[in-house]
Image (cartoon, rainbow, N blue to C red):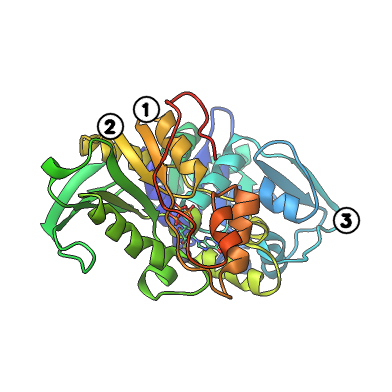
């Protein structure tokens, strides 16, 4: 999958890539960072008029419910870059009347998925390469100017991730809440994403069902104590709760902003300041309510030899994902941060629209009612809230 992984870097740099299917090739580029000159150059190389490809979440934000995961929009007269950007992620933008939408073909679909994986706004410019221009495009591929990627490979990367993790390095790192901790770093095959397992206490003293927390990174909350979310407190309380039970593991997953990346999370915060909730804000930028998968977490638990866990979370999705992957989640323990004036709305949205188990906390309006572990049904059956 090397070409597809390389494509992510090119897209992030604002370069075009060539996606190749069996019967067609399409030049694609991120709308984010696009200039009018780059757009003209792309169309000249392909010999075709560009289309705008948007995710179905963005289409929904534009008021269109559509089939499929992405739509390709054709215009009677192609808008300038600035207007394309507006269509890609500005709130309140309207589709021009003289535009037609059709379900994206494989290349266009892969373009949007690659952009999401690159943590850019999932909106692409796509120009099918006309037969008369195929030789010119091939020449750019041959001299290394343009990266060509097989569309099946790109789709595979986006669907399943980049394969095996490598355990890279480790060290003892005493923490204020757990002075007997080790950090073990894992790297994904794409070389881009790294995740850390914080192993707390002596393994011989761990409970049979190992206390585990999956924590998705949140720069603003974890590092700076942002009051907009509950992450920072959950992180520290998570370490302390694991320590208090004799030790276990906190997996610190590089999944900033529920997988949309910091740049997009800050865009989403701007939209929340205009009145949208956390889910609708992500949708305006083109994302689902949660872009995370927990395949990496499962692989890390396997690498560490942990088949049976007590999971510290309020998120039913995490329990389900680990159970589906074959980890025996025997119990679930609530892990709360404090409710503040600034994060109250966010927590209510998590409870009401994400289905997080936060109602006890929010009803209490203060300290949690209970953080006793709650036993879960055997895998295969849905856990009760
Ligand atoms: N997109 C987006 N992400 C956010 C926002 N606020 C916090 N996050 C991210 O949400 C994630 C929260 O991660 P976790 O605390 O692991 O997960 P959770 O789904 O809340 O589940 P538990 O804490 O285990 O109950 C982090 O990646 C944060 O960066 C927001 O307003 N928008
Ligand atoms: Zn946070």
Q: In which quarter of the image is the N terminus?
A: top left
CA gap between label 3 and label 2 equals 55 Å
Q: Is residue 213 visible?
A: yes
Q: Closer to us: mark 3 or mark 1?
A: 1
39 or 175: nearer the viewer: 175
Q: In this view, does 324 lie to the left or right of 282?
A: left
Task: Determine the residue positioned at 22% across, 43% down.
Answer: 166
136 or 1: nearer the viewer: 1
Task: Determine the residue positioned at 60% across, 60% down.
Answer: 363
Residue at the disc numbered 3: 97
Which mark sits nearer the N-terminus, 1 or 2?
Answer: 2
Task: Determine the residue positioned at 78% across, 66% down.
Answer: 92
SS type, badge 3: loop
CA gap between label 3 and label 1 equals 50 Å
Which mark sits nearer the N-terminus, 3 or 1?
Answer: 3
The answer to the question of whether label 3 and label 1 lie on touching residues, with beta carbons closer than 8 A, is no
Q: Quadrant of residue 303?
A: top left
**Would you call the spot at circle 2 few (<14 residues within 10 Å), some (14-19), or many (20 or more)?**
some
- Residue 284 lies, in percent from the top left, at 67, 59
Residue 326 image label: 1
- Residue 238 lies, in percent from the top left, at 33, 57
The answer to the question of whether label 3 and label 2 lie on touching residues, with beta carbons closer than 8 A, is no
Residue at the disc numbered 2: 307
The answer to the question of whether label 1 and label 2 lie on touching residues, with beta carbons closer than 8 A, is yes
- Residue 206 lies, in percent from the top left, at 19, 43
**Would you call the spot at circle 3 few (<14 residues within 10 Å), some (14-19), or many (20 or more)?**
few
SS type, badge 1: loop
Task: Determine the residue positioned at 42% across, 55% down.
Answer: 335
């Amino acid at each position: 999958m090397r070409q597809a992984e390389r494509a992510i870097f090119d897209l992030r740099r604002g370069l075009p890539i060539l996606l190749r299917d069996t019967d067609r090739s399409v030049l694609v580029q991120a709308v984010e960072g696009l200039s009018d000159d780059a757009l003209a150059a792309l169309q000249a190389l392909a010999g075709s008029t560009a289309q705008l490809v948007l995710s179905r979440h963005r289409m929904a934000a534009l008021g269109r419910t559509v089939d499929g995961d992405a739509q390709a929009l054709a215009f009677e007269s192609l808008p300038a870059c600035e207007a394309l950007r507006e269509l890609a992620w500005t709130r309140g933008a309207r589709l021009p009347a003289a535009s037609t939408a059709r379900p994206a073909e494989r290349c266009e679909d892969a373009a949007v998925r690659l952009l999401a994986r690159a943590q850019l706004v999932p909106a692409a410019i796509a120009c099918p390469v006309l037969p008369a221009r195929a030789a010119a495009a091939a020449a750019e591929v041959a001299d290394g100017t343009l990266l060509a990627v097989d569309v099946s490979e790109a789709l595979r990367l986006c669907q399943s991730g980049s394969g095996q993790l490598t355990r890279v390095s480790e060290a003892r790192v005493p923490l204020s809440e757990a002075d007997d901790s080790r950090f073990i770093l894992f790297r994904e095959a794409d070389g881009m994403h790294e995740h850390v397992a914080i192993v707390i206490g002596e393994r011989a003293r761990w409970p049979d069902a190992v206390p585990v927390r999956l924590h998705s990174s949140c720069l603003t909350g974890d590092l700076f104590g942002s009051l907009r979310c509950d992450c920072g407190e959950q992180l520290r309380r998570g370490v302390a709760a694991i320590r208090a039970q004799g030790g276990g593991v906190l997996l610190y997953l590089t999944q900033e902003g529920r997988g949309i990346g910091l740049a997009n999370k800050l865009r989403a915060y701007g939209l929340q300041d205009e009145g949208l909730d956390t889910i609708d804000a992500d949708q305006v930028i083109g994302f689902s309510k949660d872009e995370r998968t927990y395949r990496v977490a499962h692989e890390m638990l396997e690498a560490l030899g942990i088949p049976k866990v007590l999971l510290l979370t309020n998120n039913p999705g995490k329990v389900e994902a680990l159970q589906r992957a074959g980890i025996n989640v025997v119990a679930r323990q609530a892990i709360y941060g404090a409710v503040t004036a600034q994060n109250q709305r966010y927590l209510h949205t998590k409870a009401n629209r994400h289905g997080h188990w936060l109602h006890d906390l929010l009803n209490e309006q203060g300290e949690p009612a209970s953080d006793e572990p709650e036993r879960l049904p055997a895998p295969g059956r849905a856990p009760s809230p």
